[in-house]
Structures are given as C-alpha cells and as structure tokens.
C-alpha cells in the first residue's frame, strides 16, 4: 500500500509569544531598509547576508534576556538556535539561508546564552488549494489569505507540488505560514527541537 505523502505547516508567525524585544545593528543603520528586509523575508524572498543583522541587542535596559527558544522572532527578523540550524543544513533548502548573528544584552557587550542564526526564507511554492483549506482565512479587506492561528491537523489542503524539494518554504497565496517537509519535521522531532514550531499536518491531494 502506497504511503500518503505528508507535509506540515508551522504556526510560528501566528505565535506572539515568540516575538522578543530585540534591536539590531541593521535597524540603527537604516530603519527603512531593515523593515523592508523583514517584509521581504516573510514573503519568501532570498536576500543576501548584509540585509540581516550581524548583531542584535536586548531592547529594554531593565529586561535581561535569557537563552532564546529554538526559533523566535527577533524584533522582526526570524532566528533559530545553532541546534535547529544544524538540522536544517542536512536538507535541501534551495535559496533559504542561515546567517550567523550575535545576541547581546542591552549593554551591547554581554552575550546572551546560546548561538543563533538569522533565517532567510528564500523559497516559495504555489501549492495551496483554497477551496479545501478552511484554515486559510479570507482577510476582511482583501489580499492574500491568512493562516488561522487555530489551524488544526488537515486544516490546509495542498497540491502534490508541496511534496517536491526544497524542504522549507512559503506559499505564494498564504501569509503567516511556513511549510516543512515530513523528512525535515521528523529530523527536528528526533532532535527534540519542534516544541515551539506549532506544527500541524496538511492534507495533500492525490
């Protein structure tokens, strides 16, 4: 019996608890360019290393940062732990990139525990089947559909294109969603790194 293909969607972009109060050297150097990079990144556009911060700092002087989650929103940029980066590098990422960054306390001198990489989502696919995806919500004022924060397993339906490489991507017709191959998810699970990814299974058309 042929095994049905499996694809996963991550709710990280819907999870406000992953947003951390962090500033960046890129933001201080050119605020507009930094915001533009954040927007392009979440749309799945490959960007060079110089569009991402080489240093990041705790935003508030009275709040000391602890070790970050394995994936988090660093004040607009997405970042992962060195452990997640190591797993990602084992897979076909296409134009998705990992750029090393250093995270400091507000004093810009004291390092925060852990090693981190900015994650540039550099691949897109057009695999969403909207009429079979109740978790792909139609925005009130038009535009692309949004992933429902309450998405459940099977809440999105994708075409078979979703099963092709690369293993991590953004869909052209859905915001606030990151998709992962089953092989990548199983590797992250084996390394006990999926807790903050908010993973849900997607249905895939035969």
Image (spheres, rainbow, N blue to C red):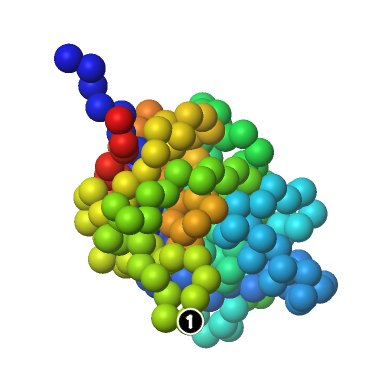
Tag 1, which secondary structure? loop
Q: Where is residue 97 drawn, in percent x and y?
A: 64, 42
Is 130 placed above or below 92 here? Answer: below
Pointer 1 residue: 141
Residue plotted at (25% across, 27% down)? 4
Residue plotted at (49% across, 76% down)? 142
Is 32 placed above or below 38 here? Answer: below
Residue plotted at (22% across, 56% down)? 152
Residue plotted at (57% across, 34% down)? 93
Q: Where is residue 20 drawn, in percent x and y?
A: 49, 71
Label 1 environment density (alpha carbons within 10 Å; few <14, some 14–19, many ≥20): few
> Which of the 4 image quadrants contains residue 181?
top left
Relative to 14, 192 lies left or right = left
Query: Nearest the camera: 49 or 127?
Result: 127
Query: Nearest the camera: 9 or 158?
Result: 158
Relative to 54, 1 lies left or right = left
């Amino acid at each position: 019996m042929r095994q049905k293909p499996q694809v996963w969607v991550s709710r990280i972009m819907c999870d406000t608890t992953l947003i951390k109060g962090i500033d960046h050297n890129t933001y201080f150097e050119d605020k507009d360019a930094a915001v533009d990079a954040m927007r392009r990144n979440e749309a799945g556009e490959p960007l060079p290393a110089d569009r991402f911060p080489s240093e990041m700092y705790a935003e508030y002087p009275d709040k000391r940062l602890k070790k970050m989650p394995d994936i988090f929103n660093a004040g607009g940029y997405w970042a992962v732990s060195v452990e997640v980066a190591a797993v990602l590098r084992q897979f076909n990422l296409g134009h998705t990139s990992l750029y090393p960054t250093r995270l400091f306390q507000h004093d810009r001198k004291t390092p925060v525990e852990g090693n981190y990489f900015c994650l540039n989502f550099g691949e897109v696919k057009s695999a969403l089947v909207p009429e079979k995806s109740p978790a792909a919500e139609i925005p009130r004022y038009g535009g692309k559909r949004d992933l429902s924060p309450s998405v459940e397993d099977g809440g999105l339906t994708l075409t078979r294109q979703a099963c092709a490489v690369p293993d991590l991507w953004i869909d052209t017709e859905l915001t606030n969603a990151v998709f992962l191959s089953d092989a990548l998810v199983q590797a992250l699970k084996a390394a006990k790194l999926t807790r903050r990814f908010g993973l849900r299974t997607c249905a895939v058309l035969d």
